Structures are given as C-alpha cells and as structure tokens.
Amino acid sequence: MPELYRPITSSLRSRLLFLTVVFILVVEMFIYVPAIATYRQGFLEERMVAAQIAGLSLEEAPGNNISPDLERELLATAGVISVIMRREDKSLLLGYDLMPEEPEATFDLTNPSLGTLIIDAFETLDAEGDRIISVRGMPTVAGTRFLEITLAENDLFTAMRQFSNNILILSIIISVFTGVLVYLSLHWMLVRPMRRVRRRIVDFRRQPEVKPNTKGLKSRRRDEIGLVERELSRMQIELQQNLKSKKRLAELGEAVVKINHDLRGILATAQLSSDALSRVRDPRIEKISRRMITAVSRAVALCERTMRHGKSAEPEPEPTWHPLYISFCEVGDALGLMDSDDFKFNISIPKDMTAYMDSDQMHRVFLNICRNGTEAQGGKGEIDISAKKEDNGTVHIVIKDYGPGIPNTAMPNLFKPFLSSNKVGGTGLGLAVARDIVLAHGGQIGLKETCGDGASFLICLPGPDEGPNDNRENTKMVPSDAENSP
C-alpha cells in the first residue's frame, strides 16, 4: 500500500494522541502516589482529633468513669475502637474492654517521612481493610502528652479506594481532554504542513520535470516548519533549473559531436583563404587578414581540444606573463571596436603591464564580457578598461560598460549556464565560460556594481606565487559562485 494511504492507526496523528494520553497518565501516577499517602495521613489525623474530644469527656465525669452505653456511643462517633490519652497528671482510657490483645499493625504519625507514609498507604490498600491497627500521633489538645488510638482499617480502606477511583477517573478525563487539545494543536501546527511537504516531495520524486506549484509552500511562518517549506520550494526550483541545464547540455553535446567534424573542415577552408589574403600587399587587407587568421586559429584550436577531450571542459591553463594591453587590443579588433566611429573602446592600461595568465583562454573571457557590453548598448556606446597590479603580481581588471545595467532578477543566476542570458537568442553560456576559466586560473570574477547607466565586472588574477581565491580586491561585488540573490 502506498505511503500516502496508510491506515489511520499508523499515522503520526494517532501516535501523537496515544503518546499524549500515556504521558499524562504517567504524570498523574506520579502525582497519585504522594496524594494517596497524604490522604491516608489526613484521614487518621481526623480520627485522632475526634478521639481526643471523646477522651476529654472522662475528665468531666465523676471518678473519670462514664456508662458503657455512653462510652460505646463516643467511640462510634469518633470512629475508633479505643483511645489512650496521658494528661499532665493522669491517664484516660476509653474502650478498654474492646481493645485487642495485640494490634496487627502499629503506625507512628508523630514525625513521619514521605517515604514511610507512601509505604504504609500501599500496605493499607494491600490489606483490603481486614486489619486492626494502632496509631500514635501528636496530640492537638493542650496538656496532652501521649495519644494512641486503635481502629478497624475497613473504613480507611474504603475511603482510600474511593479516593483512588476518583483520581483515576479524573486522570482519564484530563488525559483525554488534554490529549485531544494537544492532538489538534500539533495536527494544525505540525502534521498538516508536514503532510503537505511530504506530498510535495513524493510528487516531485515521481515527476521531477513538472514545475512545482509553489503557492502552497510560500509559508510566512518563522519557525522551523516555515523554513523547511520555503527551502523545499527553493530546492525544487533549483533542481529543476539544474535538470533543464543538464538536459540542454546533453543536447548541445550531441549536436557538437555531430557538427564539430564538419566545422573543422569549414575552418580549414577559411584558414587557407585567410593565408591567401595575407599575401596581398594592401595595408587594409593585411590588417583584416591578421584578425581573420587569429580568429580562425583560435576556432580551430578550440574544435581540436573539444574532439580530443570529448567534452567542452577547458584544459588546464598554461599561464605565462602576457601584456594586458595587447590582449584587449586583440579583443577590440575581434569585435571591430578599435576603428569604429560609433563606439569608444578605452583601454586605460599601461602597455608594459603584464598578467600571469593563459592568453588564449583569457582572451575568451575578455571577449565574452566586452561583447555583452557592446550588445547591451546596441553597438553604439562606450567601454572602459582599467587595471592595477599589486606588488605580489595580483592584477585587478575592471571592465565597465554604459548600458542599461543588469536587473536584480538576473543576479542569482548571473554565472549559471543557460540561466544568465537576458538577450534574445542568447545561450547564457558567456559568463559561465568566463567564470570557469577565471576559477581555473585561481582567480575570481564578479559583478562589481550595476545601475541604470552601466555595469562593471571585476576580474582578479593572482601572480604565480599566490594561492587560489586569495586575491579578491577589497571591493563589494556579486561573486561568480553566488547561489542566492544578494
């Protein structure tokens, strides 16, 4: 039988109700034990007070003697068999003829401990009222030095049994009533949301590709249940995004395998054509041919690496000291920005500043970011490139455009494959590829700032002696590995 259709007797609600009733009964039992002992003590003390009052009648009688009928009546009223009292100068005795030779049990209530009272109470219940007992206690009448009574235990047993039955009935009523209240409270606060969470988990496991309905789990509760509901909803959304990304990667990988071989042939033809153009002695053609040769060579190398490794992951970088100014000039040439009349490509970097990097791989990083900035401005605008170098060789590069900026909704997925694109027809791979390359260099990349008049990206590349991820500039930025929105 599926878990969702388990019988009610094995559900969490039934277990909570049962455990609540059991726990309250256990607590009531611990309360009952001292209560029954105290009740017995009070019963005997009341009999002793009544016996003292009956004994004092002897002092007013001539010769301290009363008639047998009056004596029996006084003893019956006090509920005892006999009374022995020692006053300051004499002893008083009632029921001498009725006293047993030896009582079956003797109890001392002058200074009892709780443990003794509990033991005596359960002995009384076990005897079931068939004993004649003797009880000594502290006199309450002034001038009395000693008091002892003898009585049958049947009235005491009957009273204690009635008291126990009342406690049991009251305990059951309290347990059931409290259990129902606790059950309803726990059902409302815990069971219902947990059943809803369980149902969501089961549905998601069965159909992970179906978009989850987050309406029921947008809880405003601030306790642990609310946190679980919100985190579950968030986890399902992120898992679905990852599933979509992996599915799309698999489809792209299959497509790349099919077209890579043909693409190499086309690039080989383009390379031969660019070589032929390079032999033409025209300055303008020579400049264009150099750009074409460089771009085609990089494309051929990328195709060969993809075929060789069987995947699109980047190989380990082979960093050397390379001039940053030349790298950005190549980027500007590749994008056609160096000689553009509608676009300003400002490289504010000293020509002798070098960075420890794989120039081919970092060319792709700079190209992707600059291309995004160019397209964000519609091909007409401005990009500023600046950099500074620390004594340990760490280089901080800032690429700033003057476009519309990056919306807050895109922040959480800014460097995630297929999720960061805000362009029509974009793949969302540019910043993800840039992130992987920079991290492979042991550096960091992030969004330094964004507003209505542009966005700035910060790239930190360490020197050869610096450890990975120890080179971030002391500047607030959205990191490339951010999983949550800022």
Image: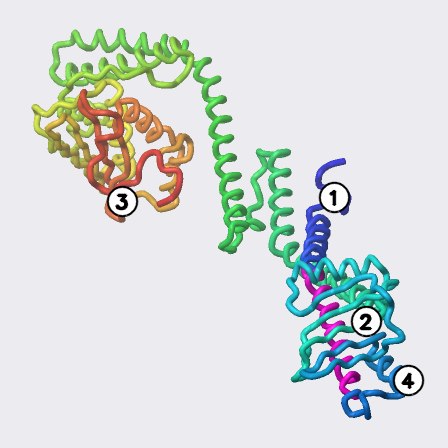
Looking at the picture, tell me which residue is in the foreground, 279 or 114: 114
Q: Secondary structure at mark 2?
A: strand
Q: Which residue is mark 2?
A: 150
Q: Earlier in the sequence, mark 2 or mark 1?
A: 1
Q: Which residue is mark 3?
A: 450
**Amino acid beneath label 3:** Thr
Q: Secondary structure at mark 3?
A: strand
Image coords of residue 101 (percent x, y): 86, 66
Spatial distance from mark 3 to mark 4, Cα to Cα?
A: 112 Å
Label 3 CA crowd tier, 10 Å (few <14, some 14–19, many 20+): many
In the figure, 392 relative to 475: above or below? above
Q: Which residue is pictured at 26% across the width and 26% down the height?
A: 468
Q: Which residue is pictured at 79% across the width and 84% down the height?
A: 54
In the figure, 101 relative to 96: above or below? above
Label number found at residue 284: none
Q: Which residue is mark 4?
A: 68
| Residue 200 in which image quadrant | top right
Spatial distance from mark 2 to mark 4, Cα to Cα?
A: 18 Å
Magenta stretch holds residue 333: no
The residue segment tinted magenta is 31-57
Spatial distance from mark 1 to mark 4, Cα to Cα?
A: 70 Å
**Amino acid beneath label 1:** Ser
Spatial distance from mark 3 to mark 2, Cα to Cα?
A: 98 Å
